[in-house]
Amino acid sequence: MQLSNHNPSCENPLAARRPWRVLLACLLLALTAQAFGQGIASYRLGSGDEVAITVYGEEDLSVEQRLHDDGIIAYPFLGELKVGGKTVGEVEKEITRGLKGDYLVDPRVRVSIREYRPFFIHGEVEGPGGYPYQPALTVRKAVSLAGGFTERASKSKVTVIREGRNDAQGI
């Protein structure tokens, strides 16, 4: 099985040699390390994530936006901010630094993910395609969401391709 988050039509070189034995699954993960148990704090924002930014006591500075391919959002007073590839904590600190002093004395900023970007799973699963990401998603849960393995799937060969990386990781 091959998991990918960059190209939903990934190819597995093993497939050419054993097309029906190897699970040719390509999982487009809208996630990074947290898919394998490292937690939401390490989740890196990316295209398709919807974030909510709240500044307590400052309604005009609270916004909700979906990240586009460039990972940039427009934020009041600070202009365009590159948040793609950063954690929620990193974005909170950046906005706090930007607002502190010139605009607010002690800004209290909270950034949360309202909706995660989807992940895609392809290959020898019953329902290949895109599914909503869920925190603490594992490969086993992703396969389950896709209806489970087909009878031709190889359950021992799984490859993960993470977003923004070209290398595949066998698991």
Image (cartoon, grey):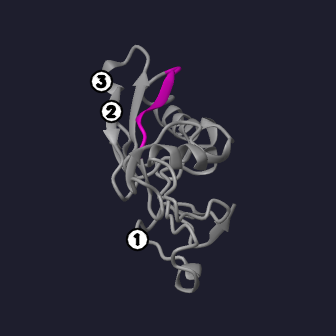
Considering only vertical position in the picture, is 17 above or below 130? below
- The amino acid sitting under disc 2 is Glu
Pointer 1: what residue? Answer: 9
Comparing labels 3 and 2, the label whose residue is closer to the camera: 2
Classify mark 1: helix, strand or loop: loop
Relative horizontal placement of residue 138, taking residue 149 as reference (left or right): right
Quarter assignment of residue 153: bottom right
Pointer 2: what residue? Answer: 64
Q: Residues within 10 Å of mark 1 (few under 14, many from 20)?
A: some
Q: Is residue 116 magenta?
A: yes
On residue 60, the disc is 3
The image position of residue 68, as x and y in percent, is 33, 53
On residue 137, the disc is none
Considering only vertical position in the picture, is 140 above or below 101? below
User: What segment is highlighted magenta in the picture?
Assistant: 105-117
Residue closest to the eye, 119 or 81: 119
- The amino acid sitting under disc 1 is Ser
- The amino acid sitting under disc 3 is Asp
Position of the N terminus by quadrant: bottom right
Quarter assignment of residue 70: bottom left
Relative horizontal placement of residue 14, taking residue 84 as reference (left or right): right
Q: Residues within 10 Å of mark 2 (few under 14, many from 20)?
A: some
The image position of residue 118, as x and y in percent, is 40, 48
Q: CA distance from mark 2 to mark 1?
A: 31 Å
Residue projecting furthest to the left:
60
Q: Residues within 10 Å of mark 3 (few under 14, many from 20)?
A: few
Q: Are circles 3 and 2 on residues that touch, CB within 8 Å?
A: no
